[in-house]
């Protein structure tokens, strides 16, 4: 599935030894595999090929210019949720005509910027937003292409913070409200509603919620058409889950089998916004062990990366696989406990230097006797990793390095103390 692999007791990323890159670039360090990004994109493109979908990579998952350039080179479109993300896409050489602009709180300035760049569609989430977009477009003598984001009211069975398609969520319009809005705005001259958008959540590990949601969306399209609406696009959003801990997420082909017949039945063009599926397992966070300590009955491994670098464990209680970059020990399968006496195994919490008890990267993991100076790899850190990093505790954000075969290049340098105070006045 990805291009991170152990050979001879050492972790490699494509053609490079991870320890060598860490020695050259320091830690903590985000390391991305270009080939993995491309493989995941191509897997989706192939699985959904019968519908010739427009795949709009969701920039929020990993917005690094180097990553965006890789995807632009693959022919990907982009899903952005702010003018800033659109700016990034443009800087990376992405085509705005293959970008969709989502988000519940677009400002008039952001709408104007996106209109001037000629984005493919605005995913509109409320009546107020649609009226504002109409005015902004008219003031610039343009017509904004729109997909209405509907809330299909299905349970995506994922973490509550990333579930978005259930009734009462702040996202999208209830189906009934969306139908009334469509009728109301039929005569507006600044907007043209061409499609329906849904995004029911993230890290969804079953195809069933997509099937249930799409059945409702297909009915919605049929109803709207019968009242005169000219809808030609269904945007299914993102959310395809990935393997963080065990092999429990569906493959691209599984999703395609569930989704393609429904979209075909509506006679609509398919658009999709995958983020995590493409980049999550294309990145690791490499961190160095600073100290070990015991407190009460717990054993801590203190590392040089913290919640400011990777917030997912603290924010969502997310599980990231953690394993030494160099070790002769065999990693136990998920859920398996290593036999007693098999090396110096111990049960540890891997924690960072940030002054919060919530600052942990992994809890209660069996690791093979790691010592200060050892490197650890935190896997599955390519999505919602560096993009969510902060300067909390006045910590500089780590560099991002892209591996391309036997080469690597820094696609974002490590911050400096000067970066920490840029723009501030004492
Ligand atoms: C509207 C929208 N589209 C796409 C995505 C990407 O989701 P994922 O990274 O799970 O594919 C998100 C993420 O929250 C989103 O809000």
Image: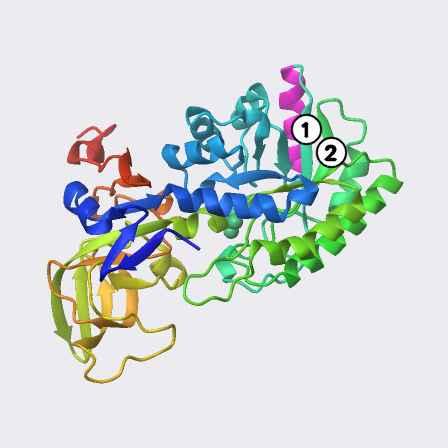
Residue at the right extreme? 226
Residue drawn at point x = 38 percent, y = 41 percent: 34
Range shown magenta: 127-140
Is the residue under label 2 in contact with that under label 1 (CB below 8 Å)? Answer: yes
Can residue 164 be seen at all in this image of the molecule?
no
Residue drawn at point x = 79 percent, y = 45 percent: 266
Specify the quadrant of the image occupied by residue 24.
top left
| Residue indicated by mark 2 | 194
Other-residue count near label 2 (Cα within 10 Å), few / some / many at <14 / 14–19 / ≥20: some
Residue drawn at point x = 27 percent, y = 71 percent: 330
| Residue indicated by mark 1 | 145
- Please give left or right for residue 404 compared with residue 286 in the image: right
The picture places residue 380, in percent across and down from the top left corner, at: 38, 55
Other-residue count near label 1 (Cα within 10 Å), few / some / many at <14 / 14–19 / ≥20: many
* Label 1 vs 2, first from the N-terminus: 1
360, above or below 189, in the image:
below
Secondary structure state at the residue bearing disc 1: strand
The C terminus sits in image quarter: top left
Can residue 221 be seen at all in this image of the molecule?
yes
Specify the quadrant of the image occupied by residue 234.
top right
């Amino acid at each position: 599935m990805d291009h991170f692999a152990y050979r001879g007791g050492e972790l490699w990323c494509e053609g490079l030894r991870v320890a060598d890159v860490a020695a050259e670039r320091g830690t903590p360090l985000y390391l991305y595999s270009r080939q993995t990004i491309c493989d995941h994109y191509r897997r989706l493109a192939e699985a959904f090929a019968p519908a010739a979908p427009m795949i709009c990579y969701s920039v929020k998952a990993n917005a690094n210019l180097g990553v965006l350039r890789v995807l632009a080179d693959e022919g990907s479109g982009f899903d952005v949720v702010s003018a800033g993300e659109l700016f990034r896409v443009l800087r990376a050489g992405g085509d705005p005509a293959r970008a969709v602009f989502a988000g519940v709180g677009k400002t008039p300035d952001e709408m104007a910027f996106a209109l001037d760049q000629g984005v493919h569609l605005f995913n509109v989430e409320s009546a107020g937003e649609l009226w504002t977009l109409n005015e902004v477009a008219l003031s610039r003598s343009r017509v904004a292409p729109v997909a209405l984001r509907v809330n299909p009211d299905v349970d995506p069975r994922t973490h509550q913070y990333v579930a978005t398609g259930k009734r009462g969520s702040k996202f999208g319009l209830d189906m009934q409200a969306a139908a009334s809005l469509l009728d109301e705005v039929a005569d507006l001259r600044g907007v043209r509603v061409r499609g329906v958008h849904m995004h029911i959540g993230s890290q969804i590990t079953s195809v069933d919620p997509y099937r249930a949601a799409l059945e409702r969306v297909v009915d919605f399209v049929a109803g709207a058409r019968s009242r005169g609406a000219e809808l030609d696009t269904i945007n299914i959003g993102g959310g395809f889950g990935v393997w963080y801990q065990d092999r429990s997420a569906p493959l691209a082909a599984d999703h395609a089998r569930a989704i393609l017949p429904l979209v075909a039945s509506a006679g609509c063009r398919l658009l999709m916004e995958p983020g995590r599926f493409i980049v999550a397992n294309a990145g690791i966070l490499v961190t160095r062990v600073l100290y070990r300590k015991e407190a009460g009955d717990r054993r801590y491994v203190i590392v040089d990366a913290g919640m400011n670098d990777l917030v997912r464990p603290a924010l969502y209680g997310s599980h990231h696989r953690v394993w030494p970059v160099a070790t002769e020990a065999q990693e136990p399968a998920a859920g398996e406990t290593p036999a007693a006496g098999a090396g110096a195994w111990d049960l540890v919490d891997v924690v960072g230097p940030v002054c919060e008890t919530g600052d942990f990267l992994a809890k209660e993991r069996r690791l093979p006797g790691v010592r200060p100076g050892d490197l650890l790899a935190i896997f599955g850190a390519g999505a919602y990793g560096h993009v969510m990093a902060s300067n909390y505790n006045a910590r500089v954000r780590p560099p991002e390095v892209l591996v391309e075969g036997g080469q690597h290049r820094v696609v974002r340098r490590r911050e400096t103390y000067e970066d920490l105070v840029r723009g501030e006045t004492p």
